[in-house]
């Protein structure tokens, strides 16, 4: 009889000690899952309002979800009396090992996150970065793809892209075209400026505001060089660049203003 009482007592102690822990763990799992669900829901809405890239939203939400679930599991194990110090140390060591193995990839991922958050450029922008110029075609987690001016595809790792200088030609909506034309020293400066300015003001894609400018840039060895600065919409840059270059040459020729060029003089020696 005493044995039965002893066993009944041990059973009651076991139920009292571990039953309450199991019930507590179940409650923590239910409440924790509900909290995680609502946190992710709120985070998703916040990202949607902030216009985060869709691929970045999915990746960050998955990463955030797994992190919260791992934290919940560690809390459950601690509630059940399982030592969590060694478990956390194993996770930290594994994370360190993976991080070192994927150092370059993680750098590119971090760069992609920064680009998508701060948005120094968007798809369709003309940018210059890492020695390349092109229109942004795709912004991915690890790389950014550009379409070069000669229609070649350029792939730049986001790590290098986010750590370097980025020139965005599209942001302001307008660009200044920088051209230089040289005329001979015999040419009249005022007339030359007038001829070049007429070319600029008559071009349909040159903007009135900001106003175009023609100024003497330098007195070079064999020419007087004029800085020519028309403004245009970003998408009209190359049209204005090539048209103005051609039209100024024709206008200077028509006005009798010489553009100096090297001359070859033949010297005949008597035999």
Image (cartoon, helix red, strand yellow):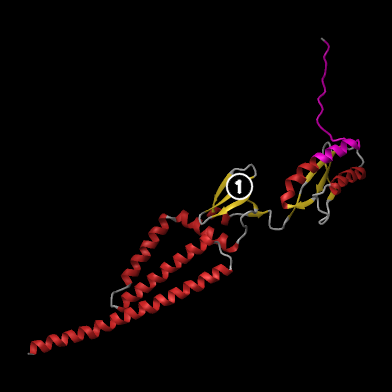
* Residue 190: image location, x then y, percent: 92, 45
Tell me: residue 17, above or below residue 260. Answer: below
* Residue 86: image location, x then y, percent: 31, 69
Determine if residue 235 is in view: yes
Q: Main SS type for the magenta part?
A: loop
The crowding category of the residue bearing disc 1, from other C-alpha atoms within 10 Å (few below 14, some 14 to 19, many at least 20), is: some
Looking at the rendered image, the quarter that the C terminus falls into is top right
Q: Which residue is mark 1?
A: 147
Tell me: residue 133, above or below residue 113. Answer: above
- Count every numbered label the image shows and give the total: 1
Q: Nearer the viewer, residue 119 or 184?
A: 119
Q: Quadrant of residue 139?
A: bottom right
Identify the residue shown where x is 13% and y is 85%: 7
Farthest residue to the left: give it. Answer: 1
Q: Is residue 251 magenta?
A: yes
Q: Nearer the viewer, residue 247 or 120?
A: 247
**Residue 121 in the figure: left or right of residue 247:** left
**Residue 155 in the figure: left or right of residue 257:** left
Q: Is residue 242 magenta?
A: no
* Residue 228: image location, x then y, percent: 81, 47
Identify the residue shown where x is 38% and y is 70%: 70
**Residue 192 in the figure: left or right of residue 21:** right
Tell me: residue 57, above or below residue 130. Answer: below
SS of the residue under disc 1: strand
Looking at the rendered image, the quarter that the N terminus falls into is bottom left
**Residue 38 in the figure: left or right of residue 198:** left
Please report the bounds of the magenta region as a residue range.
246-270
Identify the residue shown where x is 71% and y is 50%: 235
Q: Nearer the viewer, residue 222 or 87?
A: 87
* Residue 120: image location, x then y, percent: 62, 59
Determine if residue 131 is in view: no
């Amino acid at each position: 009889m005493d044995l039965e009482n002893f066993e009944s007592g041990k059973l009651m102690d076991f139920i009292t000690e571990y039953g309450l822990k199991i019930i507590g763990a179940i409650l923590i799992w239910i409440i924790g899952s509900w909290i995680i669900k609502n946190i992710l829901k709120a985070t998703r809405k916040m990202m949607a309002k902030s216009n985060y890239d869709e691929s970045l939203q999915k990746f960050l939400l998955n990463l955030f979800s797994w992190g919260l679930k791992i934290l919940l599991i560690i809390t459950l194990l601690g509630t059940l009396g399982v030592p969590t110090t060694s478990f956390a140390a194993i996770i930290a060591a594994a994370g360190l090992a993976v991080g070192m193995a994927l150092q370059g990839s993680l750098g590119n991922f971090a760069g992609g996150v920064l680009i998508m958050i701060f948005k120094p450029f968007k798809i369709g922008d003309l940018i210059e970065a890492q020695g390349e110029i092109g229109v942004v075609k795709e912004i991915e987690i690890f790389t950014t793809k550009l379409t070069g001016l000669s229609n070649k595809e350029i792939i730049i790792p986001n790590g290098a892209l986010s750590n370097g200088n980025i020139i965005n030609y599209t942001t302001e909506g307008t660009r200044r075209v920088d051209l230089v034309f040289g005329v001979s020293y015999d040419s009249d400066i005022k007339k030359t400026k007038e001829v070049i300015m007429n070319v600029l003001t008559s071009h349909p894609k040159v903007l009135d505001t900001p106003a175009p400018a023609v100024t003497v840039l330098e007195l070079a060895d064999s020419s007087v060089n004029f800085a020519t600065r028309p403004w245009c919409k970003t998408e009209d840059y190359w049209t204005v660049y090539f048209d103005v270059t051609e039209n100024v040459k024709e206008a200077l020729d028509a006005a009798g203003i010489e553009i100096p060029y090297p001359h070859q003089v033949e010297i005949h020696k008597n035999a």
